[in-house]
Amino acid sequence: MPRLHVNIDHVATVRQARHSDTPDPVFAAAICELAGANGITVHLREDRRHIQDRDVRILKETVKTLLNVEVALVDDMLAIALEMRPDQVCIVPERREELTTEGGLDTAPCLDKLHTEVPKLKGAGIEVSLFVDPMPKPIEDAARCGADYVELHTGAYANARGKEREAELKRLQTAATYAHEMGLRVNAGHGLDYENVLPIAQLPYLEELNIGYAIVGRAVYVGLDQAVREMQDRILAAQPD
Ligand code: PXP
């Protein structure tokens, strides 16, 4: 069964709405873990719109499962990742004006940098993942630069309906198999919710799901503990008997 990593960025979004100290993503992470999350994910954005450096620093000390930090492929952020040494780093594309990460990493223009930076992170004992669209080229580039994982971007699948969603699912299935054949481990995430997660939780070779917005949103109604448990139940229900 794939492991559930809860992305707690939007706990910090609420805190930053008032530039205050609550709700604290550090507390939220502990509740997620107690509810059965297998890992905690945060995106330390260059503009610090939600997660702050202080959050990552404390989470590094307090998270008992696994801490995955998403960063852009830029020197400042990579230096912070190297200094903080989370268990995993996921390299993501970032644009200041976007509401959320909109697409996978365009690996072609940054291949040289990937070839330099991925080994540095791995040398520091950090597992490295690249957030990519479900297409052959970025998967091949991820394998060539020595990444451990690809995280397949499920946003197009999540936004599609009907036949289009079926086609997006097929692309993800093909990409997961291809990544495995290329020697990569396979994660997935973005835009997943309690309804659309089921077929994704059945992707071949899938190890980790990164889910944030849907869980934090549901937590407003039922509490964070229950929101995490309900998502774990969905992932479990998707597994064959
Ligand atoms: N994976 C990556 C790489 C992301 O950037 C995000 C959003 O921060 C997620 C997963 C989680 O997406 P969502 O909040 O839509 O569940």
Image: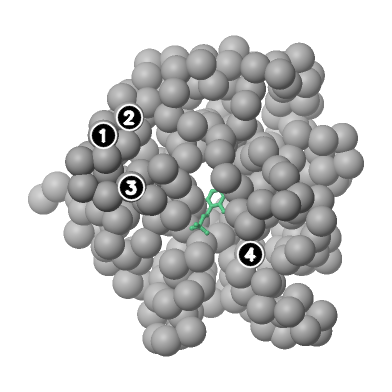
Per the image, the residue denoted by label 1 is 167
Which one is earlier in the sequence, the residue at label 2 or at label 3? 3
Q: As rendered, which of 46 and 62 lies closer to the eye?
A: 46
Taking the image as shown, residue 43 lies to the left or right of residue 159, namely right
Q: Judge depth for marks 1 and 2 and give the one in front.
A: 1
Task: Find residue 116 and report its image quarter.
Answer: top right
Kindly check if marks 2 and 3 are in contact, taking CB atoms under 8 A apart as contact. Answer: no
- Amino acid, disc 4: Asp
Q: Which label belongs to residue 80?
A: none
**What is the distance, in whole Å, between disc 3 and disc 4 at their CAs?**
24 Å
Labels 1 & 2 near each other (Cβ < 8 A): yes
- Tell me the amino acid under the disc marked 2: Arg
**Which residue does the image show at 61% across and 54% down from the upper left?**
100
Q: Earlier in the sequence, mark 3 or mark 4?
A: 4
Q: Secondary structure at mark 1?
A: helix
Q: Amino acid at mark 3?
A: Ala
Q: Which residue is mark 3?
A: 160
Give the mark nearer the N terminus: 1 vs 3. Answer: 3
Callout 3 secondary element: loop
Q: Mark 3 and 4 residues: CB-CB less than 8 Å, in contact?
A: no
* Disc 4: which residue: 9
Q: Nearer the viewer, residue 160 or 46?
A: 160
Q: Which residue is denoted by mark 2 in the rendering?
A: 171
**Viewer-side label of 4, 1:** 1
Q: In this view of the protein, can residue 181 be seen by the observer?
A: yes
List x then y, in percent, for residue 52: 80, 64
Q: SS for tag 2?
A: helix
> Of label 4 and label 1, which has the lower sequence position?
4
